[in-house]
Structures are given as C-alpha cells and as structure tokens.
Amino acid sequence: MYNLLISLFCSTAVMVAMMELAGQNPWVSGIASVVVFVGVYVMLMRSVMKKFGALMEEAQRDVQANRADRAVQVMKSAFKYAPWQLYVKQQINAQIGSILYLKRDFNEALPYLEKAFVRHWVAMAMLAITYMKKSKPQKMAETFDKATSAAKKEPLIWALYAFCLDKSGEHTKAISILEKGLKKNPGNEDLLKNLELLQAGSKMKMKVFGDMWYQFHLEKPGAIIKKQTKAMTGRRKMVRR
C-alpha cells in the first residue's frame, strides 16, 4: 500500500508543479503525472519484491535443510514488507501456514492458512483438508471451490477435492468434481484414471501425483514406509537372483 501512496503523491506533485509553475497544458501535465506514477511504483515494487524474494529463498533453504522453525522465523520477519506491497501479507501467511502444516502442527498452521493468498493453491488445499479433519465439510468445499477457481489448470487440486469428498462420503459429488477437472485439463491421465476408479466403486490412487501428494498428509506415514520397505525388499530379491 505504501508503494501506491508514494507513487500517487509523486505523480500529483509533478502534475501540480507543471500546471502551476510551468503553466503546462492539463493534458500534458496529466500524461506526465501518469508516467511518474508508473515509474515510481515499478521502481518501489521491484525494490520491495527483491528483498522479499531474498527472504523467501532463505526460508526455502531452511525448509530443505529440515530447519522448519527457522524458516518460519525468517518468513515472519518478512511481514515488515506487507504494508508496502499488495498481497505480500497473504503470501507470507501462505508460506508460514504451509511450513507448519508440513510439520504436522495443524492447529498452529490453521490461522495462517485462513489468511493465505487464494492463488496459493497448495496452502488453500491444506486449509480445506484441515477443515475436513475438523468435520467442517461446508468450509472444506468452499475452500476447495476457491482453490480450483484460482488454479483451474492444476490437476492435483481437483484430485484432492475429489479425494476429500469421497473420504467424507460424497462419492457422487467426487465424481462430478473430477469430471469438471477433466474439462479444465482435457486428457489428463491421472484425473481420468481416478475418475474411472470412482465410477467403478473403487478408491482413488493418489500416488500417481508423486511427492506432491504426500505433503498433504492424507496417507499415514506407516503406510508410506510399508510401501517403501516392500519395494526395497523386492529389489533385494531381484539382486539375489
């Protein structure tokens, strides 16, 4: 917001100065003020986003190094840039909420996820899943609706929506959601396979989405470890032969 106010102040000052002091034509003064507004705004925006981006990268490195607590603190320090640029606060909330969710600190993550940027579909999906786990199906559906509207071309968000509906006993609605997802992502094999499974009365197979699926904690860690152990055992047997 500060970026807009400063840019507006500078453009107004230029317009007044040109009209009062230089006696310029109002049209010329108006055009000059617009140019100044855009120039100042872009300059300030780039400066703020560069500093904000540096903190985001630092936090990402901490997450990759399993320093989640430090990553959260780094992201919280970025709140100082929130008054300067629109949607920065929502992006910070999305990042903090996502990190806490990954840590399984679901209750602590919730207030951040609720204030997250709607276009951050991963954070929105985490919020919707949290609502499902808290037995709030209406809020879950409303959140997923916002997420799918903002990320129509992301197959996983449609699959997550359908998975949660099916898990909540809304089998027919889950099928309709996958059908909508396929309209937005024509020919997507992962959505198509899961739609066929639901139509056949079977459970969805989300492992086709890889590591992205596991971050939502909808499959118990024990089941994941069991699958990995089974795969490793299979490879050992093959080596012995």
Image (cartoon, rainbow, N blue to C red):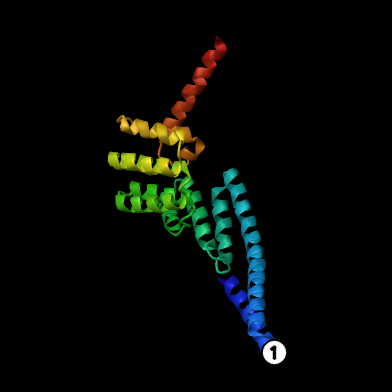
Nearest the eye: 30 or 204: 30
Residue under the point 63% across and 65% down: 45
Does 44 sit above or below residue 63?
below
- Identify residue for label 1: 23
**Crowd rating for badge 1 (residues with CA inside 10 Å; few <14, some 14–19, many 20+):** few
Can you give x and y, in whole percent of width and height, for residue 102 in the image?
Answer: 48, 45
Please report the residue visible at 59 percent of the width from the left and 52 percent of the height from the top: 59
* Place of residue 70 in the rendered image (x, y in percent of width and height, measured from the top left): 57, 52
Q: Amino acid at mark 1?
A: Gly
Name the outermost residue toward the top.
Answer: 241
Quadrant of the rendering where the N terminus is positioned: bottom right
Figure quadrant of residue 79: bottom right
Front-lying residue, 101 or 124: 124
Residue 178: percent from the left, percent from the top?
38, 40
Quadrant containing the C terminus in the rendered view: top right
Left/right of residue 225 with respect to residue 10 in the rendered view:
left
Q: Position of residue 39 (x, y in %)?
A: 67, 70
